[in-house]
Amino acid sequence: MADRKTPDLRTFETDLTAQEAQRRAAVLEAIGPNWDPVAVMQAEEQAYRMLYSDLDEDQQRIYDELVAAGVLPAHPGGGDVSA
């Protein structure tokens, strides 16, 4: 096989469209009809504010360093999250 100009390969193709449609349907079914993405995002923002609120000076310094290093995302409001 090493001395041949073309490798002995076979083309394999599959269409995942049907599987993707089934996956999406299953996700939507699991989420349910009462899922509210805006409420979910608001709850996430509230949890973020609560998690990083009331930091002491040392904790705030470490938080700021982690944000600056890109380890934590910057707070959408910027600056001190406890404010």
Image (cartoon, helix red, strand yellow):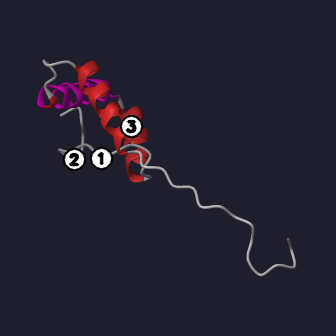
Q: Is residue 77 left or right of residue 59?
A: left
Q: Which image quadrant: the C terminus?
A: top left
Mark 2 and mark 1 in contact (Cβ < 8 Å)?
yes
Residue position for label 2: 78
**SS for tag 2?**
loop
The numbered mark, 3 or 2, whose residue comes first in the sequence reads 3
Residue at 13 percent across and 18 percent down: it is 34
Please check the rendered image and state whether residue 36 is part of the magenta-colored stretch, yes or no: no
Front residue of 48 and 6 = 6
Q: Amino acid at mark 2?
A: Gly
Residue 1 in the image, given as x and y percentages of width and height? 85, 71
- Give, as a three-letter code, the residue at label 3: Gln
| Front of the two marks 3 and 2 | 3
Counting from the top left corner in percent of width and height, residue 3 is at: 87, 79
Q: Which residue in the structure is indicated by mark 3?
A: 19
Secondary structure beneath dot 1 equals loop
Horizontal and vertical percent position of residue 32: 20, 18
Asked if disc 1 and disc 3 are in contact, CB closer than 8 Å, the reply is no
Residue at image coords 25%, 43%: 75
Please tell me which residue is depicted at 24% across the width and 26% down the height of the picture.
28
Question: In this figure, which residue is indicated by the disc labeled 1?
Answer: 74
